[in-house]
Structure formats: C-alpha cells, structure tokens
Image (cartoon, rainbow, N blue to C red):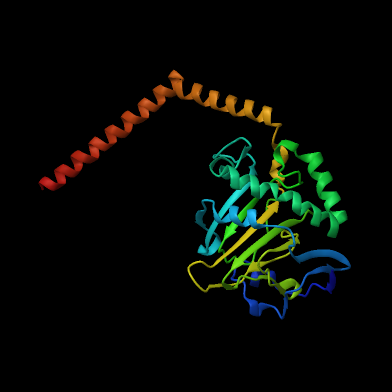
Amino acid sequence: MKRIDLERVPFDKDKFKKRSALRTDVSQMIKEDCIIYVDNQPTILYKKLQTDTSALRWAVKNIKYGEGKRSRGLKSISAIFGYSPRVAMRHDYCTATSMAMNHKKQHHIITDFAKELVGYYKEYFPEQFEFHNKLIEEKVMQDWTIGGSPFTSGIVNKNNQLKYHYDAGNFKGVLSNMVVFKSDIIGGHLVIPELDIALEVADNTLTIFNGQDILHGVSDIEYKNNSSYRYSVVYYSLEQMWKCEPLEGEIKRIRKVKTEREKKRLDPVHMDSLKKRQEELKSYSDKEFFKSAEKNDK
C-alpha cells in the first residue's frame, strides 16, 4: 500500500463551510490505492475493493429513497440503515430504521457488509479500530450494533452533491467507512481543502476517515445518460445510541410510553379541556362568519 504524507494547509473554514465543493479548490487528485498520513498518523485510507460487492450494489439500487433538502437548499436523496436513537417529539425510543422493515433483504445485505469493512479497518487503522471497538463495547448494547461491527447505523446517498461540511452526531475520535458505486458519471469526487486533495472515489472503492475532524464535500456530478448513478454507503457509530437499553428493555419502554399516552388521551380532565377548546374555536369561528356576513350585506 502506498503511503502519502501530507500536512494540513492553512485555510479559512468559514469561506468553505456550506458552499459547493469544487475540484478546482485543490491542486492534487488522488486516484491510486493509498493510506494518507497527517502528522505521522494514519488519517485516510483510499482503496479499490477486491471483495465481491455485487450484492451490496444490488441492494442500494433497489431500496426506496427519501428526498429532502440540506442546508441552503441543496437536494438530498438518501436512506438510513441500522438503528436510530431516541428523538424528542418524533419517537422517544430506540428503534430499527424503516429500511429494516420495508426492505428486509436489502437491509440485511447492507448491514452484513459491515463485517467485510471491519477487516480493512483493523488492518490499516489497528489502534483506531481497537479504540472504536472498545468504546462501543463500553457504551452501546450489542443489540444496537450492525453486522458484528462497532457501527450502529449508516446512510446511503444517491446522486448527492454535498456541500462542504463536518459530519456530526458520531462518537468522537472514531472513523467512518464509505463504499462508493459509480456508473457513467463525471465528477462526484471527495474534496478535502484542508489537505489540498480530492479523492477520485471511483466505482467500487472504500474510503475510511474521520468526517467529524476533516472538512469535506462532494464535487459536481455530470450524468452521461439516464442510467448514470453515484451511490455512497457510509457506516458510522451514533453517539446517542448509548442511551438505548437492551432490546427487551426498549420494547417495555415503548409499551409504557404508548400506555401513558393512551391514558392521557382518555383522561376525563384532558378530554374536557379538549372539548372546551373545541367549543371556543367553534364560537370564534361563528363570530367571524357573522362579521363577514354583515360586511357582505353592506
């Protein structure tokens, strides 16, 4: 494996954050397998995979994606996998992602591939992997990890150009693993201005790095035809998963929360307050209607 030693170059983060990533922002394009050292520490692995990834490619091409917008209106098409922590006002319990329920086979293939990634992680980042693995063993119940790995979750991005950003929400000091599939596109490089490099991230490649520590973005993507695509499958460990109880305990928690909600919903005092509010709204609506009618009569 070729070793490349780089230094962080001075740059104004505020000028890059949340703006589009451009190939011209950096001077060097890396296309060959290599491990990049910064301050004499292994920091980034870029490698063409020799592992059979045909099932993983099939899986990411055959799931339903949600479409939304990231900061400053950039369209995002993605699907999450693995597990989700408690989220206030949405679901106050830990749970499997919707992909696990709606696309069982695809989800199994994607999460099971984490076993393959563990081998590369151990080989090229032995100290970081040991730290990552021990941290998850201490903080997260095994019920909430995927594929016999320290990862808890992940995301599949479809045809996403991503503005410069730092990843957020993961355990500190651990590395994310990203597999990329491409076909008939130009661009879609991983641009890292702080190191003055862009990774080609060619078809069937793996990139391992700490996205919370390194500012990065995906450059413009040009599609050659209607069948063109770029998928990135990113595996990571969400910090909030430490709050999750063992699966049995979390199921009990879900039942308890739902029972409490039903009791509150059926509580006479609560029902009376809702009825009173409904009558107040109706009274207000009637008044507005008669006022409007009087005006029309005039």
**Residue 109 visible here:** yes
Quarter occupied by residue 33: bottom right
Task: Give 178 or 37, whichever is nearer the viewer.
Answer: 178
Residue 278 pos. (x, y %): 34, 30
Which residue lies at the image location 70% right of the left edge and 66% below the top edge? 215
Task: Give 238 or 271, whichever is nearer the viewer.
Answer: 238
Which residue lies at the image location 89% right of the left edge and 68% below the top edge? 40
The relative height of residue 262 versus residue 234 in the rendered view (above or below) is: above
The relative height of residue 96 versus residue 73 in the rendered view (above or below) is: above
Quarter occupied by residue 191: bottom right
Which residue lies at the image location 59% right of the left edge and 24% below the top edge? 256
Task: Give 188 or 167, whichever is nearer the viewer.
Answer: 188
Image side of residue 218 versus residue 286, left or right: right
Image quadrant where one finds the N terminus: bottom right
The relative height of residue 239 versus residue 271 in the rendered view (above or below) is: below
Residue 170 pos. (x, y %): 71, 51
Residue 167 pos. (x, y %): 68, 58
Which residue lies at the image location 72% right of the left edge and 62% below the top edge? 206
Residue 267 pos. (x, y %): 46, 20
